[in-house]
Image (spheres, grey):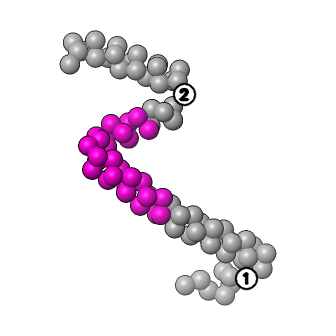
């Protein structure tokens, strides 16, 4: 536990700011947990409908990428596969 000398180092404004920041982080962590639960539910629904969730995750990740960056990555994958004799 912090002693009185340590607490005195933080003035009232800093203490208030720190408390506000901590509370915001806690709320965001709660929101994040809720969103993660929602995502898990959607992926479970997709799996239940016969979709491959691994591929869905890959598609979502690819859609986030810039098109040129994605094409460059795909070209490198093709190059590397060719270099080792394909699949």
Q: What is the C-alpha distance between the residues marked 1 and 2?
A: 50 Å
**Mainly helix, strand or loop, the magenta region?**
helix
Q: Residues within 10 Å of mark 2 (few under 14, many from 20)?
A: few
17 over 74 or under it: above or below: below
The residue shown at (33%, 47%) is: 46
| Residue at left offset 47%, top offset 24% | 70
**Relative to 66, residue 16 above or below:** below
Within 10 Å of disc 1 (Cα), the crowding (few <14, some 14-19, many 20+) is few
What is the number of the mark on residue 66?
2
Helix, strand or loop at mark 1: helix
Q: Report the residue at 46% width, 63% height from top.
A: 33
Q: Which residues are magenta?
A: 33-60
Instruction: Tell which of 36 and 24 is nearer to you.
Output: 36
Asked whether 16 or 75 is in front, the reply is: 75
Q: Give the label on residue 8, or none.
A: 1
Residue 4 quadrant: bottom right
The image position of residue 53, as x and y in percent, is 31, 43
Residue 17: x and y in percent read 73, 71
Residue found at the very far front of the displayed protein? 49
**Total residue callouts:** 2
Q: Is residue 27 above or below residue 35?
A: below
């Amino acid at each position: 536990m912090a002693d009185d000398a340590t607490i005195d180092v933080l003035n009232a404004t800093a203490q208030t700011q720190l408390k506000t920041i901590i509370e915001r982080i806690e709320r965001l962590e709660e929101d994040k947990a809720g969103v993660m639960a929602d995502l898990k539910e959607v992926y479970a629904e997709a799996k239940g409908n016969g979709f491959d969730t691994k591929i869905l995750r890959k598609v979502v990740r690819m859609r986030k990428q810039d098109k040129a960056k994605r094409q460059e990555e795909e070209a490198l994958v093709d190059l590397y596969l060719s270099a080792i004799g394909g699949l």
